[in-house]
Amino acid sequence: MTPQMIMEHINEQFEEGIIVTDVGQHQMWAAQYIELNEKKSYITSGGLGTMGFGLPAAIGSKIANPDKTVICISGDGGIQMNIQEMATSIVQNAPVIICILNNYYLGMVRQMQELWYGKRYEATCLRRRKECPRDCKGPNAACPPYSPDFVKLAESYGAKGIRVTKEEEIAGAFEAAKANQVSTIIEFLIATEEIVLPMVRGGNPMREMILK
Ligand SMILES: Cc1ncc(C[n+]2csc(CCOP(=O)(O)OP(=O)(O)O)c2C)c(N)n1
Ligand SMILES: [Mg+2]
């Protein structure tokens, strides 16, 4: 399942709403693929790059616009920076649809380690354990399971949780989330080593943009 598929489903399934992003690769995919019009608006921390922005900003958007659908697009890293605000969404009765694009990595930084540091993944794999080989070059059959279980985490707050593992499940997950009266986390297990382009290496001029 590619991130682009998820963005296309959001475009097709929501005629109106406020789309809010967190920070990372998912933010870039949202910026590139989400279609906006007079009924759809987009809130992002942009280049300020404030991980943890997405969920509280989505809840605030919902409180200010109770009649609008609010969709938060976040990563498996960023969502955990302010996950406690799930409780706020419940107690304030401010339901939002939270899409977690789970690539098991702090993907934006992993991408830089891949492109410029010979895949020396350091502090970016969210499955990494002490037993893992020092020079791991990416996911393989020996990888431990991902923690936390986002579906159970959603349920523990009194919200709903749905896990989507393949493309055919995307449409049904959004239909279910729309029908829910409480916040819904949809965890999408996406390709782990996808990169987002174009990109400029820190300190380089724009003419040295990487396009492919
Ligand atoms: C508070 C904060 N810490 C660190 C960073 C640096 N940073 C930018 S994107 C990113 C990774 C985000 O990971 P995830 O939320 O899983 O999103 P992904 O890139 O995988 O889509 C990091 C660590 C940041 N922008 N803000
Ligand atoms: Mg991630």
Image: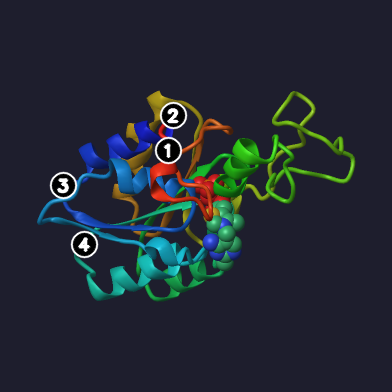
Q: Which residue is mark 4?
A: 68
CB of mark 1 within 8 Å of CB of mark 4? Answer: no
Look at label 3 and name its amino acid: Glu
**Residue 15 numbered mark, or none:** 3
The image position of residue 14, as x and y in percent, is: 21, 45
Closer mark to the observer between disc 3 and disc 1: 1
Answer with mark 2 or mark 1, whichever residue precedes in sequence.
Answer: 1
Residue drawn at x 50%, y 50% as measured from the top left: 204
Disc 1 packing (10 Å; few <14; some 14–19; many ≥20) = some
Lower sequence index among marks 4 and 2: 4
Q: Give above or below for 84 relative to 76.
A: below
Please state which of residues 32 and 154 is positioned toward the viewer in this rendering: 32
Q: Give amino acid for label 1.
A: Leu
Which of the two discs, 1 and 4, labels the residue nearer the N terminus? 4
Q: Which residue is tagged 2? A: 212
Mark 2 and mark 1 residues within 8 Å of each other at the beta carbon: yes
156 up-or-down from 118: above or below: below
For numbered disc 1, what is the local secondary structure? loop
Residue at 10% in and 56% down: 38
Q: Amino acid at mark 2?
A: Lys
The spot of residue 150 in percent (x, y) is: 58, 49
Residue 156 in view of the camera = no
User: Comparing marks 4 and 2, which lies closer to the viewer?
Assistant: 2
Q: Is residue 67 above or below residue 179?
A: below
